[in-house]
Each structure stands twice: as C-alpha cells, then as structure tokens.
Amino acid sequence: MRPKRLLCIGLLLFFTSVSALAQGAMTVSVDATDAARNIIHSKLTIPVKPGPLTLFYPKWIPGEHSPTGPINDLVGLKLSAGGKPIPWRRDDVEMFAFHCDIPQGVTELDVAFDDASQPESTASAKLARIKWNRLLVYIEGLRSDAINVKASLKLPAAWQFASALPIVSERNEELQFKEVSLEQLVDSPAIIGANFRKFPLSSEGVMHEMDIVADTPAALEMKPETLAGLRKIVQEAYALFGARHYRSYRFLVTLSDHGGSEGLEHHESSEDGVGEKAFSEELELLDFDELIGHEYTHSWNGKYRRPAGLATPDFEQPMRGDLLWVYEGLTQYLGKVLPARSGLWTAEDYREAMAAVAAEMENQSGREWRPLVDTAIDVQWAYSSPRAWMNYRRRVDYYDEGSLIWLDADVLIRTQSNGKLSLDDFCRRFHGGQDTAPLVKPYTFDDIVNTLNEVLPYDWRGFLNARVNRVNPHAPLGGITNGGWKLVYTDKPNTEIRIADHARKSLDLSYSLGVLLKEDGTVMDVNPNYPAFKAGIAPGMKIISVNGRGWSTDVLHDTIASSKSNIARIDLVVENGSFQETYKVDYHGGERYPHLERDSTKPDVLGDVIKSRAR
Ligand SMILES: [Zn+2]
C-alpha cells in the first residue's frame, strides 16, 4: 500500500541510535494468546511526570497514507499508577487523544487496553498479524524516533513467529525484543501462526527470507520454480536499484481465506496477506507475484525515498498525498517489471497486466472531471470510497495511471537514448547510492524533475504536468504505443481481469456492456459512457433475467457473444429494491477484453523493459 506527506525536507536518520531527546523507555507487553478470537491484550508502562498529560493512539499510519489507526478497536482502556486508577477523558475534537492528570510523586503510568479487531481482518483461527500501532499509546507531541520502546509478545501455545524486530530472549512462547524507537517498532510488525515455514531467499551477504504462516500445513508447500523466481526477484531488485537500504529483509506472508488480505510495506519487511491457495492456484499465484514485487519495491520507493508530505515525524500530523503517483505509481510499475524480469511472470503475463491497466485507465469516465493528482490529494478518503460509481469517481488511479506514466517515461528515455539509458538509471540515481541501514530521504516534485533531467535532458516538468496535474480525456498510453505495441480488444479473456474476477467473485464486462457484476447478477459498477448505463442500469440493481432466461453468468456471456449477429437489443430484467423493470441494452459488439498486439513498425521496447539485468 500506501503513502503520505509532510513538510520536512532533509535527511532523517532512522533506526541507528536512540535519540538524545529520549527519556526512559516505555514498555509494551502484548498478550496474543487470544488472537484467534480477534482480541489482543496490551499492557504498557510509560515514564511520566506529575501534571496534565495527553496520550495519543497512532492515527496516521505509514503506508496507509490516511488517518486509519483503528481507534474503534481500542477497548477496555484503563490507566493507573501504583495500583490506583487514574481517570481519563477523550479529547472532544481529536478522537485519538486521551487526557489525564498524573498525581504528584508518580513517575510511571500503567496503561492497559485490548485491541478488538474485526473478524476476517488481521487474524484467522490459525494465524495473526501483530501490528504494534494497534497496541500502544504514547505521549502526545513527541517524535516517534525520540521515544524508545521495549516490547514483548506472548504467543498462543505452539504458534510460531517472524518479524524484522531483533529478539533479545525467547522463552516458552514469550519473546522479548530489543529496545528500539517507536518509529522502528511500528515499522516492524510480526506474523504469528500455528503452521509456519521459512524459505531463505539469499545464500550469502544480506539475509533475505520469506516467512510464512498459513491456515493449513498443505498451504505452505511452494513449487521449486516459484522459490527460484522469488530468489531471482531479490537479485533483480538489487540490479535495478544498485543499493539496498535495509540490514536484512523479510517477506511476512500470511496464507488464509479468513485472515484478511493485505499488502503493507516496511523498510525491512512487508506484510503480504493473501488467500490460502496462493501458492497452488494459478491465478492467485500470479497475483501473489505482483504483490511481492510491489511491496518489496516499496523498501526503496516509499520507505527510503518518500514524498516530503508523507515523511511525517509522528503519527499525529496529517500526511499530504499529492506525490502518490510516484510513491504508489512507480511502485506499481516496478511491481510488474520485477516479476517479469525474474521469471515469476512470462512476457505475456506482463503484457496482459499492462493491457488491463491501459484499458481501465483509458475508460475511466472520472478522468473527464478530475486530474490524476486529485485522486492522490484525496487519499484520506480514496481507499474507503464505495465501489458504486467507482468508474465515475476514479478512486485510486494514482496507482495504475501512475504506472502508465512511468512506462511512458521509461520508453521515452530508452528511445531517445537509442537504448543506452532507461528508467533503471533514474532508479539508481534516485533510490540507489550506497548500501545503508533504513533511512528516510524525503523528496519533492522538483527532485523528480531534476533527477530525470540528469538522466536525460528533456522537458520533464511539462511531461509530468500534462499527465498528472491536468484533466486529460485520454490515458497516457505512449509507453505502449511507442514501445511497439497496440491496445486491442478481442473476445479472448484477459489474464489480469480473470485474476480480479477470481478474487472478488465478479464478472467484469467493462468493455462490452460497461458493467462490473457480482456473480449473482448484482451490479457493482457501471461506466456512464457505455450501453448498460445508457439503458438505465445503475450500481445496486440486480439482473435476474437475460433475454427471458433466468440469470446465470453463462447465459449473460452467451448473450453478449451472440450480440454481434443479433440486431435486437438485450433485454435485462432488473431488480431495484423491491421493484422490477426491463431495460433494453443496445449492444452488438460481442465479448471484448483488452490485450496488447505487436506493432511491427516499431522496435519492441516493452520487451526490453522486462529483460533480466541481474547477473
Ligand atoms: Zn503500495
């Protein structure tokens, strides 16, 4: 996922030593023995002085770019000192702040609360993700790199554990971690589970590892070619960026159909939550490969190099999302390039993914009212925006349209330099340098423009402004067309769309009728420029019959396929609440799905983009 911004220019050093500003360390003792019941117990001791005090629950979560700290899940809050209760009152405006008065003579405050998470969000019966930001409060107003924390974690019996957080001691199912800054703690989540396996991904030098917890032992089986591709992706990323900014790296994978899906980046690890069958089911594995490429890229693009507006010093200050088309867009781009370079994806898998992205962005009706940058500025609400009218809303296009902009830039650099330079050169300058421990190096729009100009002199400011900051009726498809390919539509299903349909149990007919349906016929979204909308259909309605036959996905597919030779409109009987109505859809184009077709008049630059560069 997901970025933020703020105004602090300069180099922030993280994780290296305890700040001189720090007072004594607070302790966080987490009891996860009830994780399978979606409740985790937390007890804290916080060094304090007598007088008024405000405690703050982490609100702005790195990678989520939004005030998404799950404050509703904080329950059972009790403050005390020396065994005596201390009353608290929540702030009337800032719901994440709790005020209290520390009595004379008290130097240590005890805080206890439970994290009551929603079912199917962070835990299943057999595994859980431990997110420290959900399990602590801290003294308001302090920088998160100026607070030191000693954390411990108690596991359910026979469960195992993985995290980037260094361990001091391990006894029975109780782990004591090294004292670190609050910043590092929150950036170092853990996965815990009954079924555990780890796969080393590098044999020498810096340690890379995939740690996996799963709902079943069988889910932990990985094909040799998948493991080989994952080892290769580590090499390809190093070859791309030329340096690393972590001491070791762990992919923290959870395999569960009930433990919540998630991708969240950190400096030295990533949370990669996917379905139980991600290693065995073909479409889910392709999706997993991309998730790994995306979250791993974030260690460089997002964690190390971060838009100034997202590099906030604590969890209280608002983040600014206007450069998310870099943070997420470039990550989305490289997150597809790396699986292709490492052999996890075939060249055709890559082209299918880019075709799906190109078609979706070109057909976003929201692009008629909204510049791309507005989707990024709006990030506080974008992720939670409803599915209905999504095409018109244009929700988080800074991901996918961002990736098209970076492909456009890559192909331009390759073409203008006759293949001598590429976006890899930008990445090496911008994200590479020396190997270091985790750092945050904030950047601005000007830094992007300047580094692009160092690689290849060009009007990059104009190039980016035209694509990012202005309303643009067409998607930036220059990377595809100048890269030797054409976006075409055929009746053959697109792999990337099949992956999405499989994941959300949907039927994506975006390029024929212009609708996205649930498998039961419920309309999830419509495109206002397509026939279904023009016939009167809207999100929330439910199709119950097609040309007089009862609803099934096969009946609708067959009807659309035969529409080419049928001059009659398609009759859809649709429920809207408790009413039914027949809509006549004027469509005769057959099934249509996007693909890339080779344009032999131009060199295959797209093919060059995904060539392996690791030795
Ligand atoms: Zn991301």
Image: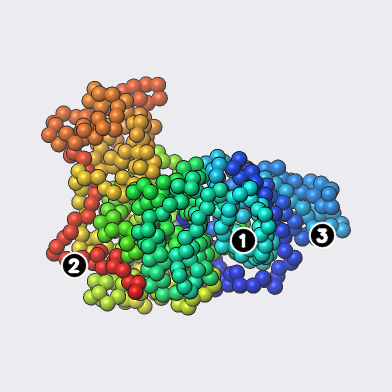
Please say if 363 is above or below 324: above
Amino acid bearing label 3 = Thr
Seen from the viewer's position, the closer of residues 455 and 125 is 125
Report how far apart the C-alphas of labels 3 and 2 lie in the structure.
71 Å
Q: What secondary structure is marked by label 3?
A: loop
Q: Which residue is mark 3?
A: 107
Specify whether tag 2 is near ligand 1 (CB below 8 Å). Answer: no
Report the number of numbered marks: 3
Residue 142, numbered label: none
Residue 603, numbered label: 2
Asked whether, in this view, residue 74 is left or right of residue 456, the answer is right
User: x%, y% of residue 27?
Assistant: 71, 58
Amino acid bearing label 2 = Pro
Residue at 18 percent of width and 39 percent of height: 589
Residue at 46 percent of width and 51 percent of height: 220
Report how far apart the C-alphas of labels 3 and 1 lie in the structure.
23 Å
Please say if 536 is above or below 478: above
Report how far apart the C-alphas of labels 1 and 2 lie in the structure.
48 Å
Asked whether, in this view, residue 593 is left or right of residue 155, the answer is left
Seen from the viewer's position, the closer of residues 313 and 234 is 234
Amino acid bearing label 1 = Leu
Q: Which residue is mark 1?
A: 185
Give the class, few, some or many, for how many residues have Cα within 10 Å of label 3's Cα (few <14, many ≥20). some
| Residue 528 image-quadrant placement | top left
Quadrant showing the C terminus: bottom left
